[in-house]
Image (cartoon, rainbow, N blue to C red):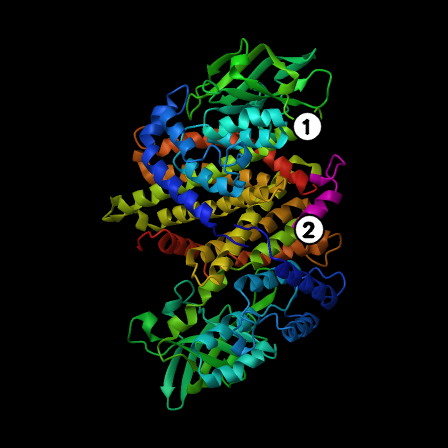
Amino acid sequence: MRFAFTPEEEAFRAELSAFLDDALPPGWTGPADESREDHWALTLRTRKELARRGWPTMSWPVEYGGRASPPMMSLLFAEEIAYRRAPGNDRFGTRMIGPILMAAGTEEQKRRHLPAIARAEVQWCQGYSEPDAGSDLASLRTRAVDDGDELVVNGGKIWTSLAHRADWMFMLVRTDPDVPKHKGISMVLVNMKTPGITVRPIINAAGHHSFNQVLFDDVRVPKENLVGALNDGWRVGTALLNFERANIDYIAWAQRTLDELSDFARTATARDGRPLSKDPDTRRRLAEFAVEIEQARLITYEAAWRQGRGETPVAEASMSKLMGSDVNLRVHEYGVELLGMFGQLEPGSPHARLEGRILKLRLAYISGPILAGTNEIQRNIIAQRGLGLPRE
Amino acid sequence: MDFGLTETQELVRRSAREFLAERSKPAHVRAMAGDERGYGEDLWRDVAGLGWTGLLVPEQYGGSGLSFADMAVLLEEWGASLTPGPLVETAVLAADAIARFGDDRQKREYLPKIATGDLVAVPAITDAQAQAPGSSGTGMTGTGVTARGRGGAWRLNGQKMFVNYALSAGAYLVSARVEGAEEPAVFLVPSRGAGESAISPLHSASGRSTCAMNLRDVMVPAVARLGGEEDGGAVLARLNTLGAVARALQMAGAARRVLEITVQYVSNRRQFGRPVGSFQAVQHKLADMALMLQGARHTAYRAAWELSEGRPATRETAVAKMAMNEALSRICSMAHQAHGAIGFTWEYDLHLYTRQAISWRAEFGDTPSHREALAAEMGL
């Protein structure tokens, strides 16, 4: 039983923090807006610098250029970056397709893609969801038809984050429509420059362009880009996703904003001239959020600890995602309230408090309980895989 | 981070589960709830025989000298079975306070008998002012009893409330306001020396063993004071800290058991041709219960670990009690809902947990008092 980090872990966190002090522009409050060219340049620069230090891939096996670091170290990496609202944590490459290729890719695929991911030379995106396949992902319909040396892909993906910046996509396609839905899916790697691909921006409720619709019109994908066996894509493409659910980002974001709100409360005055931080309701809400965040954090740390022991903490990972995404959204909802009438002011608005970023984030974080497996799905997983309750 | 247990802790957990499953079944809990002494002598003797009463007592005084982290594992199981008995009051609170603040004479007089189970010593630190939220726990400085010093003795007058197992206790740790001084004091008061103190059971939802104690001209020697003249506040704070974390651990055990009972119920109960646990609404409710338990339980163990590392754990204690107060209360409520009408009967064991949750929630700091402590720790 030990609720503290080792000296090595603390030292790593300090080193990363010092790196970010240097790498981030002065007064950086983040997050980066990936549709801004200057922020995207910062993102690429930061990722390259992090890659030079081997941090984003430190959990990778040594044979692929990693350090075989335990999951807790990757978690510390992600936590500090998220707390700083810094760009540079490339989950699609280093945490998704990288591990998928290591587990199921051919030697040629590994040789071609893994070093580029490790050097932060390439941007990936994930082509899974479709307009008619969200929670019911296995019902996906984007079709890949055998045509000799190539598969011909037709259909469309949606909610595809960073497709507008991506060089490659790893996607799930239907290669056999005549078998039960889970059994007719394959995973393929697609070069985003392939003719026939159209990326259409989707502006989200926060007013930002972060995800897209991606249309495929007779897109020819070499068969050598098939990951794993034909029609084994469901297993290849989803097994690792559970681990990613134990995601410290939400918790770090929530903590960061809670800290900013606490700082704000100490200086801003209420009607009676006293600091907001002396108002009983404010004290109550901030303390309650601190307790919730702490719980979500410990749940996530435990999931990482279990992964480090070779376990597959399915229920714990879902608990982490559920609680983290939920408390993160509610902290930001509260933050907007704490700012009173001024909570509604957009970034750039005269007299906006905290530069309007609480509002921006409160709108952006609506997505948390929805993406990466809705929180309803997470509850199903906790109940069925965690508590053993019967499926419907 | 290490969420695993040591071998000692695994052993304590296993033996506690086995022993308590056999000796502290719901029927026993129900029987003791109606008993003014509040626990079974046989059970207590065997608890002492297992070394549990001396678990925290230093070895030189006849105990095992184990850590609070080791005790934490036992406390979770003690709570899971709602076992009646002054384990927390005596083996945790009194043992720790005396070991920490007592002089050599006090340690020699009290600790060995606590270790053997021969002495039940309980805190008497709550006053009538605890009737409002935010006033139990660390905020209380014993204003209900006044201590007047004369010669080499103290005269205690006033009233303490919610003294657990008062009718069985051989000694009390009584907090008092000291006449003419700012700092409160805690006195070790033997029950035989309690003069004309009337003890009356308070009929709590969780049982009859918590009492009001009226002290009328109770004389104690100067040496009965625990700690020095400036230590009273620290003694009280320590009692409340350990009490809060101990309750949080018991609550984690109770919440776990309520969840287990509920999972079993909804898995077996069939309506509309299928287990009610196969309906999504029910699954989501249980998933939320599991989530609450998971997070809150970690905070309780975290506080226990901090204490076992010799740190004051002020923030961790506040977090743990707040988290567990909310978790156990809501888990019990949701369990009732998932059980339907059968869970609402006297005969079904669920209300035993709901009742115990009510008293534990308020004890050693209710949510408002810990929330305020946490806000202060956060620099607000």
What amino acid is at disc 1? Asp
**Residue of label 2:** A260
Give the numbered dot on residue B199. Answer: none
Give the CA distance from mark 1 to mark 2.
Answer: 37 Å
Q: As drawn, is A69 to the left or to the right of A152?
A: right
Q: Which residues are magenta?
A: A259-277
Task: Specify the quadrant that holds the C terminus of chain A.
Answer: bottom left
Secondary structure under the numbered disc 2 in the rendered image: helix
Residue closer to the observer: A291 or A282: A291
Residue closer to the observer: B283 or B228: B228
Circles 1, 2 touching at the beta carbon (< 8 Å): no
Q: Is residue A114 above or below residue A297?
A: below
Q: Residue at x 49, y 36 (%)?
A: B55
Residue A167 seen in the figure = no
Q: Residues within 10 Å of mark 2 (few under 14, many from 20)?
A: some
Q: As drawn, is A213 to the left or to the right of B266?
A: right
**Quarter of the rendering containing residue B354:** top left
Q: Residue at x 42, y 26 (%)?
A: B206
Same chain, marks 1 and 2? no
What amino acid is at disc 2? Glu
